[in-house]
Image (cartoon, rainbow, N blue to C red):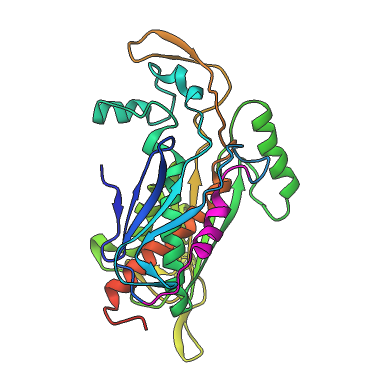
Amino acid sequence: MDNTFGLIYRTTTFGESHSRGVGAIIDGCPANIEISEEVIQKQLDRRKPGTSKLTTQRNESDTAVILSGVENGKTLGTPIAVFVENKDFRSNDYSGFTDVPRPSHADFTYKEKFGIVASSGGGRASARETIGRVISGAIAMEVLKIFDIEIAAGISQIGNICDIEGNLEAIEKEVEKAKAEKNSVGGAITCVCKNVPTGLGNPVFDKIDALLAQAMMSIPAAKGFEIGSGFSAAKMKGNEHNDLFVMKNGKLGTITNNSGGIQGGITNGENIIFKVAFKPTPTIGTKQLTVDYYGNPNPLEGKGRHDPCVAIRAVPVVEAMAAMVILDCLLRQNSTKTR
């Protein structure tokens, strides 16, 4: 199982949903970067459960503890280890799943690959694994601040509702309705990366958009990725899609941004804009007629505390993965000290 992401800025996440804890080990972070548990905690609080009625009511403080790599508030250039303890887990909620693979979950595929599956909480397939990603992303964003790079993501679609800003009440009702019906609903997140310099990314297999796609599709429940014009490009003609060049403050730029800030796999200085689609949470309370591992009919009714819409808490995860990709590409491009 490959649990490490990145070439120079490398992140290894560890822990299962119902284990003693989860976290991350980050190697390759430059020295003398100001980092504190408070900085990391601010991002973790954005994804932790129980923050609203629209998310799972699992009650976790998700308190970050820095174990190594930081001294007197600054990174040492050595591996940074951060740990978050699991406290409010209820393994009994999963007792009925021992012999029954949950539909559209990773129970079946994990067992096929490894011959064993975590007895509760989805193990490494659980969204709780993303805590390690948010930890690493929080650190990466502190480094990116030196280069004035900003990354911000937000919900852009819930179910069939796309105009988020104009339909906040409708969105809340959509999620609450799914929850009341013991069901779930999908969603999408749009991310914008500003002030990214030109020249990041490499031709052919290490294109930065390919790396972003890999990063986003590695997030639990992610089912789709598009950058710039995305799938709408299939409906356009060349003269509609081409981003014409102009001079902007003495530098070349483009009038439009159908390329999403990337051309030929290399950043062109425009904003990187992409979207990630998330499926509905697979574990639902609605009774589903499925079979056990032996093919016997088995009506399955999910128990436990699950998000009615996973996209809501995935926003900081998307930002974190984008920060990890951009920082790794930046370090690959610029081997000099950041300070």
Query: Where is 128 relative to 239, above or below?
Result: above
Q: Is residue 216 visible?
A: yes
Residue 111 on image: x %, y %: 29, 26
Residue 129 on image: x %, y %: 42, 44
Q: Is residue 202 magenta?
A: no
Of 30 and 165, which appears nearest the observer? 30
Of 318 and 77, which appears nearest the observer? 77
Residue extending furthest top?
Answer: 296
Name the residue rendered at 31%, 71% in the picture. Answer: 77
Instruction: Tell me the magenta residue range.
Output: 32-50
Q: Is residue 45 magenta?
A: yes
Name the residue rendered at 34%, 65% in the picture. Answer: 69
Total number of numbered labels? 0
Of 147 and 241, which appears nearest the observer? 147
Q: Residue 198 appears in which quarter of the rendering?
A: bottom left
Residue extending furthest right?
Answer: 169
**Quadrant of the image containing the C terminus:** bottom left
Name the residue rendered at 56%, 33% in the picture. Answer: 306
Left/right placement of residue 196 relative to residue 49 reads left
Query: Where is 284 relative to 294, above or below?
Result: below
Q: Is residue 232 visible?
A: no
